[in-house]
Structure formats: structure tokens, C-alpha cells
Amino acid sequence: MGLSFDSESVPLQVDAKDVIRVGKTRVTLDTVVAAFASGATAEEIVQQYPSLNLADVYQVIAYYLRRPSEINAYLKQRKAKGAAVRKRNEDQFDPQGIRDRLLARRATQKPK
């Protein structure tokens, strides 16, 4: 049998903001794992995100299944960072009453 078993690297890359992305796409590891955890198959994930390669999605899912605690720790850290950014933005730009302020601003503008 002439099969060789090369070890392939997982198609994950860390961008400049420490976000893990799949292959050479902008699709994040978070997105693929969330879709898979929601019950989507690799094929459904590729249909939803056509820039992904099916083989890459299978590799990412396999990587997640082999290292769930590491991946979940990363996802938890990303969620915490996202919550901190959201809180900082809400503190800086109060979202309360924004719809009313926008409607009031529109009412004072001259029609074109």
C-alpha cells in the first residue's frame, strides 16, 4: 500500500488583534465552533460561509473535538473581552434614549 500519512497543520491563523481565523478567510474560530455547537454540519457551515473550504472546516472541527477545554477557554476569553469593549462603549456613549434623540434630530432637520 503506498499511502503516506503526512501530518497537516490545522488551518487556523492568529491575526494582528489575536483573533483566530479559519484559513485565509475572515471567518473566526468562534463562528465555526458556535455553528457546530448549534448542530450545523461542516457542509452547512460552508454553505453559510462560502469563503470557507470544506476540508478546512472538518479540520477545525476535529481540532476543537480534540482540544475542547483549550478552545472553550479561548472562547470564554474572547467573550469577556467583547463584554468589556461593549461596556466601555456604553459608558462612553449612553445607549438609553438614542432612538428618541435620533428622531428628535430628524424632526429638526430641513426636508431635502
Image (cartoon, grey):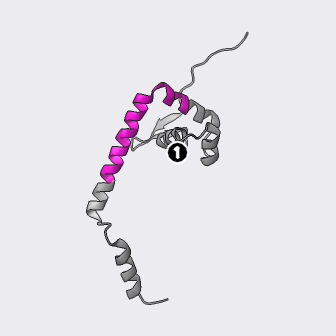
Residue extending farthest to the right is 1
Residue 52 higher or lower than 69, as above or below: below
Mark 1 falls on what kind of element?
A: loop
Q: Which residues are magenta?
A: 60-85
Residue 106 location, quadrant: bottom left
The spot of residue 108 in percent (x, y) is 38, 87
Query: In terms of depth relative to the viewer, which is nearer, 98 or 2?
Result: 98
The spot of residue 27 in percent (x, y) is 52, 45
Residue at horizontal 61 percent and vertical 38 percent from the top: 41
Please, what is the three-letter code of the amino acid marked with disc 1?
Answer: Val
The spot of residue 49 in percent (x, y) is 60, 47
Residue extending farthest to the left is 91
Query: In terms of depth relative to the viewer, which is nearer, 95 or 6?
Result: 95
Q: How many numbered marks, from 0 up?
A: 1
Residue extending farthest to the front is 39
Residue 106 in the figure: left or right of residue 91: right
Residue 9 higher or lower than 28, as above or below: above
Query: In terms of depth relative to the viewer, which is nearer, 76 or 4?
Result: 76
Residue at horizontal 40 percent and vertical 29 percent from the top: 70
Q: Is residue 79 magenta?
A: yes
Q: Which residue is mark 1?
A: 27
Q: Is residue 34 magenta?
A: no
The spot of residue 81 in percent (x, y) is 33, 46
Magenta stretch secondary structure, dominant: helix
Quadrant where the N terminus lies? top right
Mark 1, Cα crowd under 10 Å, few <14 / some 14-19 / many 20+, is some
